[in-house]
Amino acid sequence: MPANRPPDSGRLTAALLIAAIVAVVILDATTGPELHISSFMGVAPLFAALRCPYRPTLVVAVVYVVCLTYVDLLTVPDWAPASRVVGVFGAFLVAVFSLVLCRTRLEREALHARTSLVADTVQRAMLRELPLRAGPVEAFGFYVSAQEGARVGGDIYEAVETPHGLRLMIGDVQGKGMPAIEAGLEVLASFREAAYYQDSLESVAERMEQALTRYNTRSAEQGTDERFVTALLVEVRDMREGRVLSCGHIPYYLVRDGRVSERSDGEGGLPLGLGTLSAEPRLSARVRPAADDWVVLCTDGVTEARGTDGEFYPLCDRLAGWTDLEPAELARTLRADLERFTGGELKDDATALIIRRTPAAEPVEPVEPAAPADAADAVSAQPVADLRADRSATRRTS
């Protein structure tokens, strides 16, 4: 039985089915042999087998057999003995079949629950749960897979604290299905490793490019399609200066002083997997974040989501009306509004990250050493120091 089903989930259903069986049998017994409607109640144990646990199904099946036996033996006087035996035997077969059906269903549900648990664990290992916290930064947001029942898809994200500062990444893999997930996992694993050891975002992007190239080579050998990945890399070293590098990714949004602006810093690089098509290197751009800045990163599953009228989702306009919300509430509001806008029918994976500095990470201004209260005191302090130095030298000479 699935873990999300309560232990007594079939009791009410079983009680209603038993009541229906008893009511039909009573009606059958009072209307005479001309109307033998209790034979149609064979659907009751079969319905219980599809909806109830094993014990409630067994009770329904037993009640059904007992009631049908009573009707066939005592309420139909004109039946031949052979007809009575056939009626009772048919009821018994229906009951046994319902029990076998229930047992088979429960075994399949248990297998599905174990498989789902393993798959869910693997998916959680691939993408960490939001919100993410890395050093002095926290990232709230949401991830919605376009594939029903899947926790992950073609979108990837990560935030890690490294010796080179805080580094974040959001990406979107071309295509859908398992090939897109596999390509995304290759790029994500490469980022997690390179972010720690590479000095620059350009070097991190190069390692991600190499990992995806190796994956595409294997895919070509196996006869499957090659993939490319758009990615946006962000680095913050001292909370006052950062760098941004875009590998063909859509712009991000900066929320500063209650105003929202679309930023395209670091754009110009080709998506990962297509870097060999151009001789131009990918170059990051310097940014100077303020203490109260928010940054909103997303994939095109958000900005290119279409409403029922065919219009694209106006993310910038929506954010401008929600600048007074806390990041966690903003993430919930944005997700709910996106689902309402699309009517709950997203055609692509949608990911959004709302990134801000944690309240405990507010910078502390350095305190300047206090100046002497009087300039004369500062001047008179110097002869005293010289006198002490002379005395110390005299003692060492003697």
Image (cartoon, grey):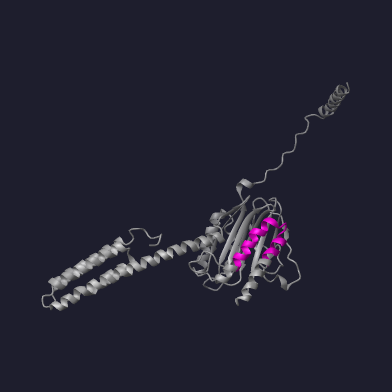
- Magenta stretch, main secondary structure, is helix
**Residue 363 percent location from the top left of the image:** 67, 46
Which quarter of the picture shows residue 376? top right
Q: Nearer the viewer, residue 379 or 271?
A: 271
| Furthest residue in direction top, as rendered | 398
Question: Is 19 on the left or on the right of 287, as rendered?
Answer: left
Image quarter (top left, top right, bottom left or bottom right) of the C terminus: top right
Which segment is the magenta one? 183-209
The answer to whether residue 312 is visible is no
Q: Nearer the viewer, residue 42 or 290?
A: 42
**Residue 200 percent location from the top left of the image:** 72, 58
The total number of labels drawn is: 0
Question: Is 119 on the left or on the right of 258, as rendered?
Answer: left
The answer to whether residue 161 is visible is yes
Q: Is residue 330 magenta?
A: no
Q: Is residue 200 magenta?
A: yes
In the rendered image of this protein, does residue 173 appear above or below residue 364? below
| Furthest residue in direction left, as rendered | 77
**Residue 80 percent location from the top left of the image:** 12, 78
Image quarter (top left, top right, bottom left or bottom right) of the N terminus: bottom left
